[in-house]
Image (cartoon, rainbow, N blue to C red):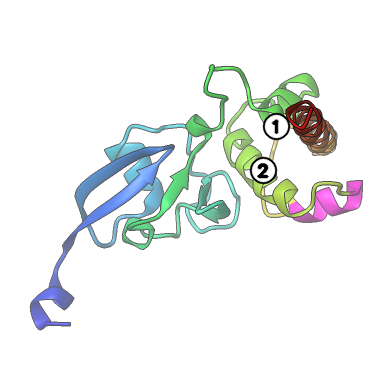
Amino acid sequence: MSVEAALATKRLVRIEVNGVVHEREIEVRRSLGDFLREDLDLTGTHFGCEHGVCGACTVQVDGQAVRSCIMLAVQADNRCVKTIEGMANPDGSLHPIQQAFWDHKGQQCGFCTGGMVLATEDFLRRNPSPTREEVREAMSGNICRCTGYQFIVDSILAAAEALRSALEGASGADVREEDHAGR
């Protein structure tokens, strides 16, 4: 790397956010969260502690939950980012995780909910049939000051069930289609 490149304060990045590619020249020290909120106006990503402790700023980068307050935007160059604004279904209906949080009162003030939902999606992808204790452990890095966590745990367990049911329904439909295709 040249001295000029090492001393550069700005860099051109290409980041896909919620399916839309954005190319911007940004300060190399700009956090991913600031980039999302201030440059792209995606204000569903909230800042609580700005030290990576509370989880309010959780987004997904290449499908993995990360704290956007401590990740630099340049680290997301040529990667895919998902924010809470990208969770809804293409028709605008709520994602099953969002619906479960709504149905089971897993949100109160809503400040932590976006980060909770994105962390939940990552967790359930890795553990589709969690126990109550596994949910509590997995979500221990996401702080909520309103709910006491009972409703959040209930929401996540309901979301896991809904996602499993949807998957079973989809695989059953695939089998039925294959049966008909072979006739």
* Mark 1 or mark 2: whose residue is earlier in sequence: 1
Residue sticking out furthest to the left: 4
The structure residue drawn at horizontal position 80% and vertical position 24%, both measured from the top left corner, is 104
User: How far across and down, in percent of the image, does residue 51 sit?
Assistant: 50, 58
Q: Quadrant of the N terminus?
A: bottom left
**From mark 1 to mark 2, how far is it between C-alphas?**
7 Å
Q: Which mark is residue 179?
A: none
Q: From the viewer's perspective, is 11 left or right of 183?
A: left
As for residue 135 lying within the magenta part, the answer is: yes
How busy is the neighbourhood of tag 2: few (under 14 within 10 Å), some, or many (20 plus)? many
Cβ atoms under marks 1 and 2 closer than 8 Å: yes
Which range of residues does the magenta coloring cover? 131-138
User: How far across and down, in percent of the image, does residue 130 sit?
Assistant: 86, 49
Q: Quadrant of residue 36?
A: top left
User: How far across and down, in percent of the image, does residue 26 sit?
Assistant: 21, 53
Which residue in the protein does label 1 denote? 97
Which residue in the protein does label 2 denote? 121
Position of 104 relative to 156 (above/below): above
Q: What is the secondary structure assignment of the residue under circle 1?
A: helix
Q: Quadrant of residue 39?
A: top left
Residue sticking out furthest to the front: 183
Q: Amino acid at mark 2?
A: Glu
Q: Amino acid at mark 1?
A: Ile
How busy is the neighbourhood of tag 1: few (under 14 within 10 Å), some, or many (20 plus)? many
The structure residue drawn at horizontal position 45% and vertical position 53%, both measured from the top left corner, is 69
The prevailing secondary structure element of the residues shown in magenta is: helix
Q: From the viewer's perspective, is 118 left or right of 34?
A: right
Q: Foreground residue, 82 or 136?
A: 82
